[in-house]
Image (cartoon, coloured by chain):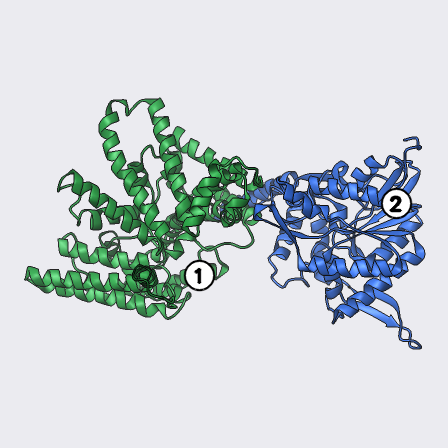
Chain colours: A blue, B green
Amino acid sequence: MKVRVFLNIFIAVLVVLLATEILVRTLIISPSAALPDPELGWKYRPHSEIFHTVEGFSRHRLNSLGFNDEEPGTKQKQHLVLALGDSFTEAFQVDRQDNFTSIAEMLLPCVDIFNAGRSGLTLTQYPIIAARLKSKIHFERVVLFLTAGDIQDIEHQNLRKTYDPKNGRLIDINIIVKKSSWLKQALWPIFEHSAFATYMKNRFKALDLKADNFFPWPTISVVEKNSQVKSENDEIEIVDFILKEMQENYKINILFIPTFDYLPSHKTVEREVSLKARHIFKNQADKLEIEFHSVNILGEIFKNGGNPPVGFANKDILKGHLNKKGHMLVGKALAKELSIDCSNTAVN
Amino acid sequence: MIFTSLQFLSFFIILIALFAVIRGKNSRRYLLLIASYIFYGAWSPHYLILISACSVWGWWLGLLMNNSNSDGKRKFYLLLSLMLSLGMLAYYKYANFFAANISAALGLEWHQVDILLPVGISFFTFQTMSYTIDLYRGNIHVCRDLGKFMLFVAFFPQLVAGPIVRASEFLPQLEKRIRLSPRNSIIGLQLFLGGALQKILVADNLSTFVDSVFNEPTMFSAGTLWLALLAYTIQIFCDFSGYSLMAIGVAKILGFELPVNFRMPYISRSITEFWRRWHISLSFWLRDYLYISLGGNRKGVTRTNINLMLTMLLGGLWHGSSWNFVLWGGLHGMGLVGHKYWIKWQHPLRDDKVYSLFAWAATFLFVMLLWIPFRAKDFSTTIAYLGGLTALHGGVNWPHSMSIMVLSGILVWHLLYVTRNEWLNSFPSAFPVKAIEIYPILISLMLILLFAPLNTSPFIYFQF
């Protein structure tokens, strides 16, 4: 009798787990597509399928380089531009044809913009991505999509700064990536194959149970958080160093995506962290004569009525990542920023 | 220590483990009393003094009343007991409200006094009062055992948010030995999980959306305001009904029966029916101890209407020290009075299906609109919200998909309830202890794991 009861319970648990896995894969999330990376903390597995429902509902197939764009070289355009940024650029929240790099490509038919955005990436990691992609795709220009998060990340990352002992100048910056624990490594195959396990891992992370060392989101290794930045001068020093490094190797443009609070009576106020970040990036860009543009239309558009350019029906309508409207605005700003004349170019 | 916390889960597991060890009839009762006091003391140990005092005077004055032969003395003990209970309630819950309003009326300056509202004070004072009144009316026997009486007042499953249990329902259950049985545990667990699903999956998922919209109603479009109002209508039902069901489930596991507190109130076809289905233990308490005490319907039409209005105004005030609650109660009172006249007029049509649908729609709309003053933080927000519902200006449009999904689920639940012979009502007891019972439990747990918002909000009725 007891054996039968336990057998019934065992079968019921299996059936419910299987049903849950199917439910999660169909409606919520795909299994983890993250792989460890010694420099970046993690990267996406090439050709992974990503089902995103945190903000909006969209499904994406990543390319062979692990980014949310078509296979490099398939577009055969006259100009190739590399777009570097964080989750705003990655744009899992909207369909690929609606993200700002695709919008700009539509407006500039002779330009292929390779989207190399990835959530969690930050300014100090963009040179690494650009260097890796240089040998694989032959871009002529880099556009950095910067947000307030890039300055906040600098404040929290554990960076190793190397100074020239002779003149005291900053000569190198490294992000210290912590190796994952044996437990995480042991559990990782489960996350790679189970959407339910991945979803639960993400939920536990979001609970902020101080379990970073146990289940860091979203990968098995993580960029260590231990700030070496003590003042705004430290931030400026790092921004200056990265921008110079990028400028030495590539032609670059900066597009800043400001963060606004969307208030009653269709008022908008740019957040302080955004103002500060914009100020730092603009000053350093001006100093180095890098083209800089802030997409302030994201705040202004709300004043005309309707919904803001951020937010989603399934999350929060007033904050979060760019929605379709926001991507349209940034896409137009990007096309304008690139100012490439495609009028005499045959479209492939 | 809310039911949906790990703290409560640990507490309950330890209690069940102790029940396995402690087997004496009285020992188990005292264990339950100690557990109830630990449960209540977890909010603030200071509150234990209040609940103990309330229990002691309720019990002692009851004894004195019972031992007294003179009507005058019996009335004196009744009034003294009621005054003590109401006095405590008035001080902790309404002192600032009354003082602020009196000061405003007299043009004096008033600074808010820092009084922390003890959790569940409205519930345990009402239970104590019901005992005293029932004893005075001769409806129940006196309770001579202080321990039993203290457990009646402090029984932890229903202590902080009801159902309001009457002495006649609870005290006889203490005469029997407290037994844990697999049958009761399975049913209790199912009821508890059913309540948890209502609270965590429905109410908590809706609250994010509802809170955002009610905080800034002027920001949103009319469509969004209607959706948020509907969401709040369901949120408050599932929040409170969920808590009641969890309380009933926990009590069931411990071998106690608590009264049903909600019977699908939103299928009501009149406001009178609504109050027979909504927070039943409170509405029947108000009927039996306030409305009837005021004279009920025995003193003519005008007096009946006045009694009804007074009962509902005080019922509104019971929910909180704010004019918004008084307004809510008053409008419900007007609805009840209006319905009394209406039934005289429309009687021949009552069984007509079209009429039933119209009556349901009108009742639901009335109840839903009255949730605005109940939820809005002040009167100006109430006005702004009501204005926004009819405004044509283009505010932010937020078709919150989680709310739409949850509301669709609730609609299906209600339709099934109406069309399938109230099958859900018999759900917990319909299953014998068989393998099939494991599935609802596992599915409930899985749904909670998957869809519970990460920050569970406290139960709405805790504040009352």
Nearer-the-camera pick, B128 or B76: B76
CA separation in Å, label 2 and label 1: 57 Å
**In the rendered view, does A248 fall on the left or right side of B19?**
right
* Residue A9 location (% of width, % of height): 52, 46
Residue contact at pointers 2 and 1, CB within 8 angstroms: no
Nearer-the-camera pick, A102 or A41: A102
* Residue A39 location (% of width, % of height): 83, 59
Nearer-the-camera pick, B136 or A269: A269
Residue B183, above or below B355:
below
Answer whether residue A39 is visible to the viewer in this image: no
Nearer to us: label 2 or label 1? 2
Q: Amino acid at mark 1?
A: Met
Answer whether residue A97 is visible to the viewer in this image: yes
Q: Amino acid at mark 2?
A: Val
Classify mark 1: residues with Cα within 10 Å, few (<14), some (14-19) or many (20+).
some
* Residue B360 location (% of width, % of height): 36, 31
Residue, far bottom: A166
Residue at the image point whose x is 24% and y is 34% from the top: B340
**In the rendered view, does B142 fall on the left or right side of A152?**
left
Residue at the image point whose x is 13% and y is 42% from the top: B299
Name the chain under label 1. Answer: B
Q: Which mark is residue A81?
A: 2
Q: Which mark is residue B1?
A: 1
* Quarter residue B144 falls in: bottom left
Q: Which mark is residue B276?
A: none
Nearer-the-camera pick, A282 or A236: A282
**Helix, strand or loop at mark 1:** loop
